[in-house]
C-alpha cells in the first residue's frame, strides 16, 4: 500500500498510514509469542481539559522510537497507553464546564486519543486502560484490600494540608512553599479523618532496593533523601516541676553537653502544660501564626527565626542544669519527637535563634583553632566534662551509652518519610472497598469466617464523639464497588466528600458475606449477615490508579485477576520507563511501595517495578522560560503537525538536543528537519512519482558509500539503544547528503536508509518502504545489520618525510608495497622539490604510517 503522490504530501501520507496501522493492528503485542519481549512504558497522561501539550510528544516520541526500533529488531514489543483520568484535574474541569466528570472524562479521553493518533505513536490501543473504568478500578480496590489485610491501612484524625480554594486535603508532596502544587493556592493545617497507608513500614526496603534499578542517579538520590533515614539518639529531659519528661531526637548526641535551651514545636502535645500562666496568650498567638506556614517556610534557613519562651525549664540528664524550654516553628511536629535539644554552637538554625534571643552559646566540639561558630564539622570534645578529648564519633557512642545506662535515652533511627495520606474528600476517585459497622456486627462478621482471608490482625477502627466504628472489607467477589452517580459533585468545603449526598449508597443494610446492600431507609433484609453499615465518604487519591497501571497493560481485559500469572511472568516489568523528572519522588515512590506489597502477596515476582528509567528533559518555551498559560509561550503540537507533519515534528523534537536535556523550543530550526525529510523523499521517489531511477537493484556501491552506510547502521543502532536520538539523526543527515552526491545507489542501501529513519519518522518511512517495493510494514522489520569488515577502510594515510621532515601525505592501499608508496611520494611536488639534485640513500617504510626518505 502507498499513496500515489510524486511530492512529499505529508498530510495525505500520514493519514493513510495511520489508517493502515489501525486496520492491520500493526502494533498489537501478543501474550503468546516465542519472541523475546520488550516492554516500553510511558507515564500515561491525565486527560485534562487543555489537550496535549508539547511535553507529551517529547517523551512519547522518544519511547515510541525505542519501541519501533525493538519491534523492527524482531522483539515482541508491548507499548501501551492509557488514561489517568481520576483526580482533581478532571474534576475541576468538570466543575468549570458544568459537565459531569464521567462525561468529561470520556470526552477528554477521546480527544487525547485522537490527538495522539495524529502523531503516529505505535501504541497498542487494544490494551488501553482507564483508571476510572470500574473494570480497572476493581483491581485498584483489590490491591487496597491487600494492603488492608496486611495491616498497612488505618484511619486516623490527622493534621493535614487543607486548601480552601480547592476545598480539599492535599498530601505533603502536593504542597510547595505553603501553596498547593496545583493552582498555587494557600494551604492551612486542619484536622480531618483520613485513610493512611503505612509506607513507612517499607522505608528500609525502599532505600535498599534502589540498588536494583538502573535509574538516573539524581532520582535515586531524591528518593533516598525523601525517605531520609538518619541515625542518632533520643534523650529524655525531665521537666522541672512537672511529672513528665520531654523527649528529643538528635543526630548529634556528642553535643549533649552544649545544650543551652530546648525547643518544642507549636503542635507539641506538652506545650499546653509547659506554658506558664503569664505566657498563655503569647504562646497561643504564636501557635495560630505557625499553623498558616508550610514546613518549608518554617525550616528555611534564610527566614528569620521566631519563638516564645514557655516559662518552663527542663533538667539536663547529665549535668542537672536547668534549661529553658521554648516553642518555635523551626521545629516540626512531624519529625523525630517534635522537640529538640538546641546546641547553638554547632547547629546553624539553633545558632541563629540563640543570637536573636540572646541565649548562651557553648562550644563543645573543637575542630581547629580557627573554628567560627556555628561549627558543624568534626573534631574533639571540649567543655564536656568526662567526655573531653574524645573524638566526636566515639563521643556519640559513649554519650548514647551513658543515656542508656541511666534510662534517659537510647539509639534511634528516624525517617523523614511519613505514612501516606491516602484519602481525598472528593467525588472523582475510587471508593474505598470498606464498610463501617458497629463492634458487635464486626464480631459477628469475623465469627462467620466469610472474610477470613481479608481481615487484618488488628481491626481498623475509628472513634469520634458518636462512638467507635469498625471497618469490614468488601468481599473481593463483590468488587468493583462502583462510584455512585451523584448530580452534585462539587466539594462541600466542609471536609466531607460529596459522596455523603449519595444517601442510598452511603447508609445501607449491608451483607458482609456477599457485599450486597440496600438503602438503610428501607427494611432490613432477613439473615444475620445483614448489618447496618456506612460507606467511607473519602475516595482514593489520583496516585492510586497510577500505582499499578503498568501491570494491567499486560493483560488488560482479564476479569479474574489484575493480570494472569502467565502474563505477569512473560512481561515481568517494563524494560524501559520514560517520563518526567517531576515524578522522581511521588508517583515513583508510591508505585514502588505498591509493587513491593504485591511482591509480598506473591502476585509479582520482581522486587522493583521499573528496572530502567529515563527522564525526558523539560521543554521550555521559545523564550527559554518554563511553558505556562500566563507566559503565553506554549507550543501547540497539533498546529505543528498541521503545518509540518507529524514526522517532522517527531524528528525535530528529537533533534532539539539530547532527550534528557532541558531545552527551549525553537520554531526556526524545524525547517531544517523538513528539508531533510524532503531530501529523503526525493532520493527515493522520482519526479514522475515512480522510484527514483538512480536506485538500481544489484548496483555495487562505492567503497566510500558502503563504509558510510555501515558506519551509520552501527551508530544509529547504538544511539537508539541509548535514547540518543539527536546524534542518530545527525548521522542520517550525513548519510543522505552523501547518497545525494552519488549518481547511482543500490536498492539495498536505499532500503537500509529507509529502515533507519522509520522509527523516528514512521509515516514517511512506511511510504518510502512501500515505494521500494516492500509489502509489509517497515515497522515490523527487519532492522539492517552492519558488517564490521565494511567499517574498516582498506586505505591508510601515509606521511611522507624527507630526512625526517614531513613533506606530504596520501591515502594508499593497505596492501601497497614500499616501491609503490615510494613512487607515489616522488610524485608529490613538495617531496620532489626536496629530493631534487639528491641521491636516495635509504628508505624507511613503516606500513600504515610513514615513508621516510634519506637522501643527500
Ligand atoms: C542537636 C544537634 C546538634 C543537632 C548539632 C544537629 C546539630 P536530620 O539530620 O535531618 O535527621 N531536629 C530533630 N527533630 C527535629 C524537628 N522535629 N524539627 C526540626 N529539627 C529537628 O536532622 C536531625 C537534627 O535536626 C537533630 O539533631 C535536631 O538537631 C534537629 F550540632 O540535635 B540536632
Image (cartoon, grey):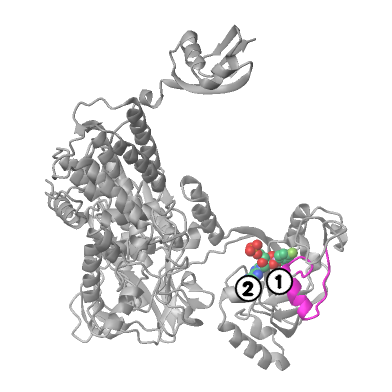
Q: Residue at x 35, y 48 (%)?
A: 573
Residue 407 appears in view: no
Q: Is mark 1 within 8 Å of ligand 1?
A: yes
Q: Position of residue 202 (x, y in %)?
A: 48, 57
Determine whether 731 is above or below 23 in the image: above
State left or right for residue 296 relative to residue 584. right
The spot of residue 820 in percent (x, y) is 46, 11
Instruction: Kindly indicate whether the residue at mark 2 contacts the one at mark 1 (C-beta within 8 angstroms).
Output: yes
Residue lying at 17% horizontally and 36% vertically, measured from the top left: 693
Quick one: quadrant of the C terminus? top right
Span shown in magenta: 343-364
Sooner in the amino-acid sequence: mark 1 or mark 2: 2
In depth, the one of 111 and 658 nearer the eye is 658
**Left or right: where does residue 365 sit relative to residue 620?**
right
User: Neighbour class for label 2 at 10 Å: few (<14), some, many (≥20)?
Assistant: some
In the rendered view, tell whether residue 4 sits above or below residue 509: above
Which percent across, then down, holds residue 680? 27, 44
Q: CA distance from mark 1 to mark 2?
A: 8 Å
Residue at numbered disc 1: 349
Quarter of the rendered image showing ligand 1: bottom right
Residue 447 appears in which quarter of the rendering? bottom left
Q: Nearer the viewer, residue 487 or 418?
A: 487
Q: Quick one: SS at disc 1?
A: helix
- Return the x and y of residue 486 as percentages of the image width and height: 24, 82
Residue 299 numbered mark, or none: 2
Residue 663, numbered label: none
Q: Classify residue 152 by image quadrant.
A: bottom left
Q: Name the foreground residue: 832 vs 543.
A: 832
Label 2, ligand 1: CB separation under 8 Å: yes
Magenta-span inclusion, residue 354? yes
Amino acid at each position: 500500500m502507498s499513496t500515489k503522490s510524486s511530492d512529499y504530501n505529508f498530510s495525505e501520507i500520514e493519514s493513510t498510514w495511520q489508517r493502515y496501522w489501525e486496520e492491520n493492528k500493526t502494533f498489537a503485542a501478543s501474550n503468546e509469542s516465542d519472541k523475546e519481549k520488550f516492554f516500553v512504558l510511558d507515564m500515561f497522561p491525565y486527560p485534562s481539559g487543555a489537550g496535549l501539550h508539547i511535553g507529551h510528544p517529547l517523551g512519547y516520541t522518544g519511547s515510541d522510537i525505542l519501541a519501533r526500533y525493538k519491534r523492527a529488531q524482531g522483539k515482541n514489543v508491548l507499548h501501551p497507553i492509557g488514561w489517568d483520568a481520576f483526580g482533581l484535574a478532571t474534576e475541576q474541569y468538570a466543575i468549570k464546564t458544568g459537565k459531569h466528570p464521567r462525561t468529561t472524562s470520556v470526552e477528554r479521553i477521546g480527544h487525547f486519543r485522537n490527538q495522539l493518533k495524529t502523531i503516529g505513536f505505535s501504541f497498542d490501543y487494544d490494551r488501553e486502560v482507564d483508571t476510572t473504568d470500574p473494570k480497572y478500578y476493581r483491581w485498584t480496590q483489590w490491591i487496597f484490600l491487600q494492603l488492608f489485610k496486611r495491616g498497612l491501612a488505618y484511619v486516623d484524625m490527622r493534621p493535614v494540608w487543607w486548601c480552601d480554594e480547592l476545598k480539599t486535603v492535599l498530601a505533603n508532596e502536593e504542597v510547595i512553599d505553603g501553596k498547593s502544587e496545583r493552582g498555587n493556592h494557600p494551604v492551612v493545617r486542619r484536622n480531618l479523618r483520613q485513610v493512611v497507608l503505612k509506607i513507612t513500614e517499607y522505608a528500609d526496603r525502599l532505600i535498599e532496593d534502589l540498588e536494583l534499578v538502573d535509574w538516573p542517579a539524581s532520582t535515586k538520590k531524591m528518593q533516598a533523601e525523601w525517605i531520609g533515614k538518619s541515625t542518632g539518639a533520643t534523650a529524655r529531659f525531665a521537666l522541672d516541676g512537672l511529672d513528665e519528661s520531654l523527649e528529643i531526637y538528635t543526630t548529634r548526641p556528642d553535643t549533649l553537653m552544649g545544650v543551652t535551651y530546648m525547643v518544642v514545636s507549636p503542635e507539641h502535645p506538652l506545650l499546653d502544660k509547659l506554658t506558664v500562666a503569664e505566657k498563655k496568650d503569647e504562646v497561643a498567638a504564636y501557635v495560630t501564626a505557625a499553623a498558616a506556614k508550610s514546613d518549608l517556610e518554617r525550616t528555611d534557613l534564610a527566614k528569620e527565626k521566631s519563638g516564645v519562651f514557655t516559662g518552663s525549664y527542663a533538667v539536663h540528664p547529665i549535668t542537672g542544669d536547668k534549661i529553658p524550654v521554648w516553642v518555635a516553628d523551626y521545629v516540626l511536629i512531624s519529625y523525630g519527637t517534635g522537640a529538640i535539644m538546641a546546641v547553638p554552637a554547632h547547629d546553624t538554625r539553633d545558632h541563629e535563634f540563640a543570637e536573636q534571643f540572646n541565649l548562651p552559646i557553648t562550644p563543645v566540639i573543637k575542630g581547629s583553632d580557627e573554628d567560627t561558630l556555628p561549627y558543624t564539622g568534626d573534631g574533639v570534645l571540649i567543655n564536656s566534662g568526662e567526655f573531653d578529648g574524645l573524638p566526636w564519633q566515639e563521643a556519640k557512642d559513649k554519650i548514647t551509652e551513658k543515656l542508656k545506662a541511666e534510662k534517659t535515652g537510647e539509639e534511634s533511627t528516624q525517617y523523614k518519610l511519613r505514612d501516606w495520606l491516602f484519602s481525598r474528600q472528593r467525588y472523582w476517585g475510587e471508593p474505598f472497598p470498606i464498610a463501617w459497622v458497629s463492634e458487635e456486627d464486626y464480631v459477628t462478621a469475623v465469627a462467620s469466617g466469610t472474610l477470613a482471608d481479608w481481615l487484618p490482625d488488628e481491626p481498623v477502627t475509628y472513634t469520634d464523639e458518636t462512638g467507635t466504628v469498625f471497618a469490614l472489607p468488601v468481599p473481593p467477589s463483590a468488587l468493583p464497588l462502583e462510584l455512585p452517580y451523584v448530580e452534585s459533585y462539587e466539594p462541600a468545603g466542609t471536609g466531607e466528600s460529596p459522596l455523603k449526598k449519595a444517601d442510598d449508597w452511603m447508609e445501607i443494610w449491608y451483607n458482609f458475606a456477599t457485599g450486597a446492600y440496600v438503602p438503610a431507609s428501607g427494611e432490613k433484609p432477613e439473615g444475620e449477615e445483614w448489618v447496618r453499615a456506612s460507606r467511607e465518604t473519602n475516595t482514593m487519591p489520583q496516585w492510586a490508579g497510577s500505582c499499578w497501571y503498568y501491570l494491567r497493560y499486560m493483560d488488560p481485559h482479564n476479569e479474574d485477576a489484575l493480570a494472569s500469572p502467565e502474563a505477569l511472568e512473560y512481561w515481568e516489568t517494563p524494560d524501559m520507563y520514560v517520563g518526567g523528572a517531576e515524578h522522581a519522588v511521588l508517583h515513583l515512590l508510591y508505585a514502588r511501595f505498591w509493587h513491593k506489597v504485591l511482591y509480598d502477596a506473591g502476585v509479582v515476582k520482581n522486587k522493583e517495578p521499573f528496572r530502567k528509567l529515563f527522564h525526558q528533559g523539560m521543554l521550555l518555551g521559545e523564550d527559554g522560560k518554563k511553558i505556562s498559560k500566563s507566559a503565553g509561550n506554549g507550543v501547540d503540537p497539533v498546529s505543528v503537525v498541521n503545518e509540518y507533519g507529524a514526522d517532522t515534528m517527531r524528528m525535530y523534537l528529537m533533534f532539539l538536543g539530547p532527550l534528557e536535556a532541558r531545552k527551549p523550543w525553537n520554531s526556526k530550526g524545524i525547517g531544517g528537519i523538513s528539508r531533510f525529510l524532503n531530501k529523503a523523499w526525493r532520493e527515493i521517489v522520482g519526479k514522475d512519482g515512480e522510484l527514483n531511477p538512480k536506485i538500481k537493484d544489484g548496483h555495487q556501491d562505492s567503497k566510500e558509500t558502503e563504509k558510510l552506510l555501515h558506519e551509520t547502521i552501527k551508530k544509529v543502532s547504538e544511539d537508539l539503544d541509548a535514547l540518543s536520538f539527536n546524534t542518530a539523526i545527525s548521522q542520517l543527515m550525513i548519510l543522505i547528503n552523501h547518497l545525494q552526491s552519488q549518481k547511482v545507489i543500490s536498492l539495498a542501501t536505499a532500503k537500509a536508509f529507509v529502515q533507519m529513519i522509520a522509527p523516528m519518522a514512521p509515516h514517511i518511512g512506511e511510504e518510502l518502504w512501500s515505494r521500494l517495493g516492500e509489502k509489509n510494514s517497515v515497522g515490523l522489520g527487519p532492522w539492517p545489520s552492519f558488517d564490521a569488515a565494511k567499517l574498516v577502510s582498506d586505505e591508510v594515510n601515509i606521511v611522507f618525510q624527507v630526512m625526517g621532515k614531513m613533506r606530504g601525505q596520501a591515502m594508499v592501499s593497505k596492501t601497497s608495497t614500499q616501491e609503490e608508496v615510494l613512487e607515489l611520494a616522488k610524485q608529490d611536488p613538495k617531496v620532489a622539490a626536496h629530493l631534487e639534485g639528491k641521491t636516495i640513500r635509504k628508505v624507511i617504510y613503516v606500513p600504515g604510517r610513514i615513508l621516510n626518505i634519506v637522501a643527500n
